[in-house]
Amino acid sequence: MSKLLSCSKKMGNRKGLLLITLFLNFFGFSSPKLDVSQFPSSFLFGTATSSYQIEGAYLEDNKSLSNWDVFTHLQGKIEDGSNGDIACDHYHMYKEDIELMHSLGVNAYRFSISWSRVLPRGRFGGINPSGIQFYNKLINELLMRGIQPFVTLSHYDVPQELEDQYGAWLNAEIQEDFGYFAEVCFEAYGDRVKYWATFNEPNEVAKFGYEWGMYPPALHSQPYVAAHNIIISHAVALHIYRTKYQDKQRGLIGIVLAMAWYEPLKETAEDYSSAQSIIDFDIGWFLDPLIYGDYPNEMRRRLGPKLPKFSAKDKEKLQHGLDFIGINHYTSLYVRSCGISHCIAVEKDGIPIGKKTPMPYYYVVPEGMEKIVTYISKTYNNTPIFITENGLSQKSDDSSSVEELLNDTDRIEYLDSYLTFLTRAIRKGADVRGYFVWSLIDNFEWIHGYTMRFGLYHVDYKTKKRTPKLSAKWFKDFLNAPRLQGREDEKSKLI
Ligand SMILES: *[C@@H]1O[C@H](CO)[C@@H](O)[C@H](O)[C@H]1NC(C)=O
Ligand SMILES: *[C@@H]1O[C@H](CO)[C@@H](O)[C@H](O)[C@H]1NC(C)=O
């Protein structure tokens, strides 16, 4: 096989490579080499970021403090003691960042709107014209470059005022606040924004903020109440979009969840049911109510009265379904049953599930991409899917050299292999509409501060200079390769 491949390289033409690839496929030897032609021509390829992680300007132009502004300023919360006060200074450098995207050749950009920039006091104060204006400038500049804005309304940050006034996600009042925020955004930007995600990773917000205490408000109680209010807040925003805006604005609205793939450790009934249980608790937790109207039975059975109930009125709001499901996928983990609970493992017989990465519990397992996408597609009626995040971190401290960080061959390998397994899910019938690399530029990685770098572009945090890594060049070459026209016809002719 390697002989054939090196021979194809010497032939140095596409047709030769295609012939050999087809030969190998025909005999079931390998997946075809990754090629942009394997994706539909309408497919969105983009990069992703979020407001708190890149914008900075944390008190500029009448923005108020968000829960993350307050949290990062508490001692000992962030690994390197840093915060997002300045971050990548994207607020002032957005034009340059759009230029980077334009040079990559992406046709979409996923970003989030800072709630406290647009509505500094939530619904208790006015709309901030400077906040509205910033995203107008961003959106217009993107469209001028042929880049579709893909907007997340809530990517972790909430105005601190809502936390102080009533406890944010723990209080049903937030449903009204979120609905108001969503409507302000639909009204201001919906004429140009055709992709809306209500929430980013609410499953992590609820777990990390209200169970494990690593994210604000750093509590160890009531994750199910927080999640319940998020689900209904989502439904309220969806109801507003469906009934007042969608007809004339013609966009799509969905939600984005963090989705690891959970692999049973052993081929036993116990481990399979444990893996399913964890999937129900992590993903079904949000998608079952939004698509089927209620929590998974498994959650009801295990949690009993700790799991809130949807009232008849809530259920009415949950009737609107989802236009798409956003999947943030990075890793797979093993699951085994242990007593009445389930345990996560990262090794089987001493062998790790994949190559370890600098992020705790993140391993390189490209097959997981095919598995999670296929599972979501089959479980949720083939709802359209966007891969809203996928990427690899680099550990960075004072000892890392910039040259090393720029030569990110492992990131190229990661993206290539995950995209290859994505094409397999698409060939099996999943309706996948887009893929976003996390992230455009290195940025503030939450509790890890600036010690984890996910960017296609390196950021020097002192000078704010952006420098393309090798992966940026790879992504650009991938996106700009000529599409193989009539590939399918050619295949049947050749065989
Ligand atoms: C900030 O708010 C004040 C008071 O409403 C207003 O006078 C000022 O123009 C605002 N500044 C900006 C940059 O929006
Ligand atoms: C980049 O890294 C690869 C392997 O990771 C190495 O073979 C290559 O020499 C490096 N290139 C540079 C310019 O450092």
Image (cartoon, helix red, strand yellow):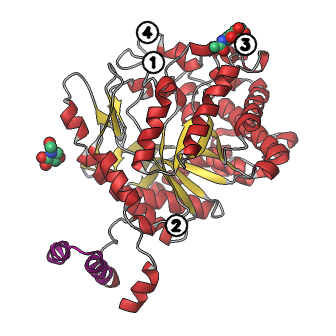
Q: Report if the CB atoms under discs 1 and 3 are less than 8 Å apart.
A: no
Q: CA distance from mark 1 to mark 2?
A: 38 Å
Would you name the residue on which mark 4 appears? 75
Q: Residue, x 38% and y 26% (percent of image)? A: 448
Q: CA distance from mark 1 to mark 3?
A: 27 Å
Q: Residue, x 71% and y 48% (percent of image)? A: 290
Would you name the residue on which mark 1 appears? 86
The answer to whether one can see residue 346 in this image is: no
Task: Assess disc 1: are there few (<14), some (14-19) or many (≥20) residues with their C-alpha within 10 Å of its C-alpha.
Answer: some
Q: Which residues are magenta?
A: 1-24
Would you name the residue on which mark 3 appears? 165
Upstream in sequence: badge 3 or badge 2: 2
Does 460 appear above or below 41? above
SS category of the residue bearing label 3: helix
Q: Amino acid at mark 1?
A: Ile
Q: Which mark is residue 215?
A: none
Q: Is mark 4 within 8 Å of ligand 1?
A: no
Q: Amino acid at mark 3?
A: Gln
Q: Main secondary structure of the magenta part?
A: helix
Task: Assess disc 2: are there few (<14), some (14-19) or many (≥20) residues with their C-alpha within 10 Å of its C-alpha.
Answer: few
Q: What quarter of the picture does the C terminus occupy?
A: bottom left
SS category of the residue bearing label 2: loop
